Image: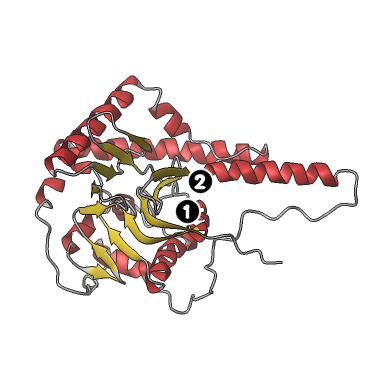
Amino acid sequence: MSTEPEVIRVRSLFLSDVHLGTKGCQADLLIDFLRHYDADTVYLVGDIVDGWRLKSGWYWPQNHNDVVQKLLRKVRKGTHIVYVPGNHDEFLRDYVGSSFGGIELVDHAIHEGADGKRYLVIHGDQFDMVVRHARWLAFLGDWAYGAALATNTYVNIVRRRLGLTYWSLSAWAKLKVKNAVNFIGRFEELLSSEAQRYEVHGVICGHIHHAAMHDKFGVRYINTGDWVESCSAVVEHYDGNFEILRWTDRQVQVSAERRATRKRTRGQAALPAPSPLPPVMHDDDGDHAAALPVADTLKAALGLTSSERPAAEGSRSKGPDNKRAA
């Protein structure tokens, strides 16, 4: 009996705020998600790699490398991947207009849905006043956020031992603090206004780690969430409908199935422990020999080695909005 997961095909997939290079990144869950979903086009909507943290202390475990390899393998199988850098991976904005491993780097993108509606795809940090005008405060906030994520780690160790699923203390606190709630509302309004300036039907963004989809400000606002707190992504189905997927919901389903299995086997001869979620540390075809030196490439791009910057496929050009995205 095959143990391979059923793959769901969608028209477009939007991911942001993975923060590879940090301990808070839920890389295993993301790889599990990528094993279950394929798309014609994948948009990486910023902060996929956390250059801020990597510069202050190198952290790059194998499962973070596996995320990159999984995406590159999708490219080789025909998926079109568009990467819109954010503030944490702003070092990639120097390469806008280039292509790395078949992944196209752009400052922003205009996505046309199956129903003909057009959406501005942008990370969104350009509309965060703290990031634009008080970078020292942004770095301080990033440190505090990292401390909250470290607390998350210990909280979830206890939860796993109790048979509970992943829960984010930082996400819970964010929605309980009045100033944070007000910031989210203002951010959504600004991004919706930017979509109207581009004369499109909506905006798809990331940055604030809060998945949402609504039409409160005259256009469709879609935020992909993140893979640190909510473990969420946005997919566009072939009928043009968009959906927010929260991958920790699958953990709830798996936990329920395991409890049912233990209940059925209670009183019978001891059986091996139920299998964990499908293995995610290695890809299906085992193509590890072809793995690119991801860590070395990142170190060079971040200026952490004396190596020259990695050569890009195609010409290097900066997008018109790079300066305002500081």
Q: How many numbered marks appear?
A: 2
Q: For the residues marked 1 and 2, what is the alpha-carbon distance in whole angstroms?
A: 8 Å
Q: Which mark is residue 247?
A: 2
For the point 38% across and 57% down, the residue is 11
Q: Which mark is residue 237?
A: none
Q: Mark 1 sits on what residue?
A: 30
Q: Residue furthest bottom?
A: 289
Can residue 292 be seen from the camera position used here?
no
Q: On the image, which quarter does residue 64 sit in? A: bottom left
Colour mode of the rendering: secondary structure
For the point 70% across and 45% down, the residue is 257
2 left or right, relative to 166: right
Instruction: Residue type at mark 2: give it.
Output: Trp
For the point 38% across and 45% down, the residue is 241
Q: Residue 181's x, y, as percent?
A: 33, 25
Instruction: Residue type at mark 1: give it.
Output: Leu
Crowd around label 2: few <14 · some 14–19 · many ≥20 (10 Å) = some
Q: On the image, which quarter does residue 203 sit in? A: top left
| In this view, 101 is above or below 173 | below
Q: Residue 3's x, y, as percent?
A: 65, 63
**Label 2 near label 1: C-beta < 8 Å?**
yes
Quadrant showing the N terminus: bottom right
* Secondary element at image label 1: helix
* Secondary element at image label 2: loop
206 left or right, relative to 135: right
